[in-house]
Amino acid sequence: MRFLITVLAAMLGLAGGAQAQTVYEFPEDEATAAFVANEVIATFYHELGHALIDVLQLPVLGKEEDAADHLSVILMNDIWEEDAAAEILASDATAYALMAAQREAGGEEPAYSDEHSLDLQRYYTVVCLFYGANPDARAELAQDLELPPERAERCPYEWESAAGSWDAVLADATPGGDNYGLEMAEGQEGLPLADLLAEEVIALNDRFGLPDLVTVQVADCGVANAFYNPEDRMITLCTEYAQNLQDMWEAD
Ligand SMILES: [Zn+2]
């Protein structure tokens, strides 16, 4: 009966946290699982950038997508220990390289009309920022990830510009007082992707307080995506997004 109700709800397209949902299980292969988990985290940080811009009504001078990419690298750098941060960054860069390769293999042009920067531009920007945050410790990583020396030279400045801008606008977004935080949607416990994000929510709530509650959910979307919806202040990580990351990694 429960099954029937769930199927009916899905057929009727009922929205909300209780919709029928494919359970994404991380693959047994450790490298694959780590890649998917790392990139889910990096993507979540990016979507959080959109959420912060919305609830804090931040001015965005330039592309919002770039600002969100910058916040993603800032959080990797600030929240994680060096080795783990470097792994997340490398996975993020790899995801952009795989997306670019997938597009090329499909005979597609780079997505010039997309609101995001091109996949390979995003690749070099995240590597540059991460390197620029700590050039002494990360020179080898930058070399492994083929950051050109001409770009590398300017990366400490790029980092300072990006981190300084975000720091300035987040100065008052501190936990406590009347501020809200992030919250997992109901009924998500036990979903491996949601459990992963729930840990991030805890870490981020130590860092940020927001004038509005932002909810985080894992859901089936019918498309490999992750997004923030300002109407219900919800960050959604699609199960298809994690599966697509795994597929790209395994096909490479
Ligand atoms: Zn975005």
Image (cartoon, rainbow, N blue to C red):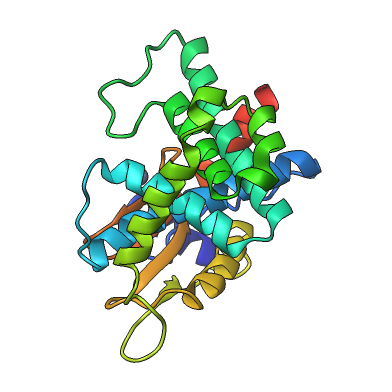
| Relative horizontal placement of residue 231, taking residue 35 as reference (left or right) | left
Q: On the image, which quarter does residue 51 sit in?
A: bottom left
At a point 28% along the width and 28% down the height, the residue shown is 114
Give residue 218's position: percent from left, percent from top.
48, 57
The outermost residue toward the right is 29
Q: On the image, which quarter does residue 211 sit in?
A: bottom left
In this rendering, the answer to whether 16 lies above or below 69 is below
Give residue 107's position: percent from left, percent from top.
44, 8
At a point 48% along the width and 48% down the height, the residue shown is 43
The outermost residue toward the top is 107
**Quadrant of the drawing holding the C terminus:** top right
At a point 29% along the width and 20% down the height, the residue shown is 112
Q: Is residue 148 visible?
A: no
Q: Name the quarter showing ligand 1.
A: top left
| Relative horizontal placement of residue 84, taking residue 45 as reference (left or right) | right
In this rendering, the answer to whether 48 lies above or below 242 is below
Give residue 208's position: percent from left, percent from top.
42, 74
Give residue 250's position: percent from left, percent from top.
69, 28
| Relative horizontal placement of residue 72, taking residue 51 as reference (left or right) | right
Q: On the image, which quarter does residue 168 sit in?
A: bottom left
Q: How many marks?
A: 0
| Relative horizontal placement of residue 112, taking residue 28 as reference (left or right) | left
Of 231 and 43, nearer the camera is 43
In this rendering, the answer to whether 38 lies above or below 230 is above
At a point 53% along the width and 61% down the height, the residue shown is 3
Q: Is residue 26 visible?
A: yes
Of 17 and 230, nearer the camera is 230
Of 119 and 156, nearer the camera is 156
Of 60 and 99, nearer the camera is 60
The outermost residue toward the bottom is 177
